[in-house]
Amino acid sequence: MLPFQLFLTPESFRNHPGVRLILRHLSALGDTFAHPAEVESLAAGDPLIYEFVDLRDGLSGSMLSFGLTVIQPGTIGGEYYMTKGHFHAAQQDGDEVYLGVSGTGLLLLQSRQGESRAIELTPGAILYTPLAWAHRTVNIGADPLVFFSIWPSATAYDYEEISRRGGFPQRVMDQNGRPALVTNPAFHI
Ligand code: S6P
Ligand code: ZN
């Protein structure tokens, strides 16, 4: 592989050779939101919740993979738009770094033991996620939330464990126009 340059914009990432564009509409998010997704998707025309511009496939031979995520602003049943969230399933070398580019978000984290954390993701913020912590990003602002992520290419993804646990320990709900962390009664380890 050869050296290359990218910029922290969706256009720069989308135009890179070998990129994979993952569009997640509400109908594809299954049990992510507490509110039944299929009902809302019919009512609201199945909106695009987020886009993930993934450079994994364009970086063959690289030990690092990276991408840019754009989460639209909005709520479903009072819950802010967010990513599915996943554990990294690698035995080792599965840590990840996020860099906030624009917009305002929260990174929700849960450990294998069910501990919960929430860290603000704002422009210029660098967030470090150790291997054992599942992560989900929530857009709590009025504009799209854009962030860069970089992780070891050997990492495998585990989305099923999030579903099995009933999501994350906390949900981010709109309360009188402001985001509030609310206990998720469906969560279990
Ligand atoms: C990859 C990293 C992010 C997410 C992306 C979409 O390890 O955590 O780039 O893939 O934000 O989220 P998700 O949960 O749908 O993969
Ligand atoms: Zn990840």
Image (spheres, rainbow, N blue to C red):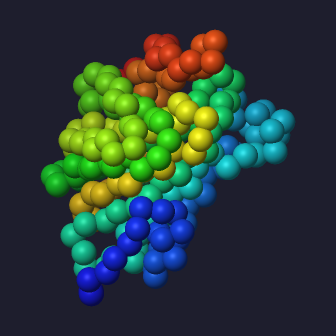
Please say if 28 is above or below 134.
Answer: below
- Image quarter of the N terminus: bottom left
Percent coordinates x, y for residue 70 in the rendering? 53, 51
Q: Residue at x 27, y 30 (%)?
A: 111
Residue at the far bottom in the pictured view: 2
Q: Is residue 73 left or right of residue 94?
A: right
Residue drawn at (57%, 45%) of the image: 144
At x 26% / y 83%, what residue is drawn? 3
Residue 164, quarter of the rendered image: top left
Along the line of sight, which residue is nearer the eye, 136 or 124?
124
Q: Is residue 15 above or below residue 161?
A: below
The answer to whether residue 2 is above or below residue 31 is: below
Q: Is residue 101 left or right of residue 81?
A: left
Q: Position of residue 72 (x, y in %)?
A: 61, 44
Percent position (x, y) of residue 84? 50, 42
Q: Which sits in the foreground, 90 or 179?
A: 179
Residue situated furthest left in the rendering: 92
Q: Total label count?
A: 0
Quarter of the picture containing the C terminus is top left
Does the rendering let one see residue 184?
Answer: no
Q: In this view, does 111 lie to the left or right of 30?
A: left
Q: Can residue 68 be seen in this view?
A: yes
Residue sitting at x 26%, y 50%: 96
Give x and y (percent) for residue 145: 51, 44
